[in-house]
Amino acid sequence: MSKPIALSPEESDSNLETSAEKPQLGIWELAWPAIVSNLLFSVIGIVSIKIVGSLGAEAVAAVTTGNRIFFGLQAILMAVSAGTTAMVARAWGAKDYKEAAKATSVSLLIGNIVAVFLMVPCIVFPLQIAGVFGLDESTTRQAAEFIRYISMFNIVFSINMVIGTALRAAGDTKTPLWVGVVTNIINVFLVYFLVYGVHGFPKMGVAGAAIANGLSFTVGAIILLYLWYRRKLIVDVGGEGSLTRNRVRQLVHIGYPAGVEQFVFQAGFVVFLWIVGYYGTEAFAAYGIGVQILSISFVVGFGFSISGATLVGQHLGAKDPQEAERQGWRATGMAIASMVMLSLVIVFFAKEIAMFLIKDELVVEHTIVFIYIMALAQPLMAIDFTLGGCLRGAGDTRYPLVTTMAGLIGARVGLAALFTYLELSVDWIFAALIGDYMVKSVMLARRFKSGKWKKIFLDSESKFTN
């Protein structure tokens, strides 16, 4: 397997004096593999929803619930990955490849420890966790099964997340792409086999979708670990001396605000979905299907978020903050244009796509309205995704936390609660998302324009190395 064009760790020692060199990869070169990888994941997700959707609205609502709880409990893992991005990208920009390798090793160790702690409550109390949404008994029971089974694979998700994040931060977005292709192809076949019980596999329904997800990511984790320990990846294994107090403290210092942000984000989502669930299983299922459909547009924003975070971190490491800022704005502009164009296509075929995924007329009706509303929010979402990623890549993880609290909790949940109190339709609840992204996009744009993020990492670095 050929490596991306970059200096190997063995060559790095002789090049530390050239740390002022600019990173060579551009926004699109970094973004397109991440976009394709996430796009494939979204398409596979849509196929999975189609398979589960044949079991009815309750099954779709159960999977939506299970996924939301699962992602909520991954908040700390996402915090670890935020620290990984900032530390690896900064080290790579400074041509300090050994430090990038050591930061990756420490991140993986911490991520796996966190994964084990996250797994325990999901296995012991899945029914109680799923019950927070107040859905009917059958849906809650199916969601609990989904949560229990998918949580058994927490370490696998940690491995994929941390190593994939480190590779992207170093500029290699192609390896996570092809590993993701393998993972998702396996996933879709396993979902079909385990949900329906064909070709000798047991018929497991919603639980089968969770197991299929976990098994496919297990394959991805095995591939990444094999390549990493065989030193076939652009980021090397840290080896002896990686686990130091200062390195752990810096990772935690950068990562914990992102962890708190994700916790607030997921908690806000739980409250918001609880409000949506108040309008019935059909409205809840429509939200899950609508998000899955629009994820085709969302992944473009995530791709530019990754490229923006990588380039901002690398250019700051190369002592070029002006170029870091320029690349951040460019990535945001490209994200806005791409997401708007994709969302327009989705809007045009909204009814056909919704009817393909589920036959329930009321669910289809709610899904179409949700897609129309979210299409209006695409430029705001592009700003949120990309500039939020750029700030995290710079190590400024605290400000995105503030924006999440203001946007998600203040605007989205606040407006949804108000509209429910006024006894408005669920369409108004969906519209509360526009207020959320409007608040966050304005706050993030002002923060990035201020330039305060340019010194955040240096401040933490001097704090933990002196």
Image (cartoon, rainbow, N blue to C red):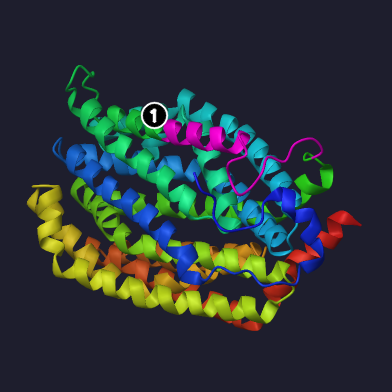
Mark 1 sits on what residue?
215
361 falls in the magenta region: no
Residue 176 placement (x, y as % from top left): 47, 48
Left or right of residue 343, residue 361 in this image: left
Q: Nearer the viewer, residue 452 or 17?
A: 17
Residue 29 horizontal/vertical position (percent): 47, 66
Pick whichever, 332 or 430, lies toward us: 332
Instruction: Assign a secondary structure to mark 1.
Output: helix
Tell me where residue 116 sits by quadrant: top right
Q: Residue at x 38, y 64 (%)?
A: 300
Q: Find residue 294 and report its horizontal and vertical position in percent.
A: 28, 60
Q: Residue furthest right?
A: 466
Residue 432 in sight in this render: yes
The segment highlighted magenta reads: 217-241
Q: Residue at x 51, y 61 (%)?
A: 306
The quadrant the C terminus occupies is bottom right
What residue is at 85 percent from the left and 59 percent from the top?
463
Q: Is residue 286 above or below residue 201?
A: below
| Residue 447 placement, left or right of 466 | left
In terms of depth relative to the viewer, which is nearer, 90 or 366?
A: 90
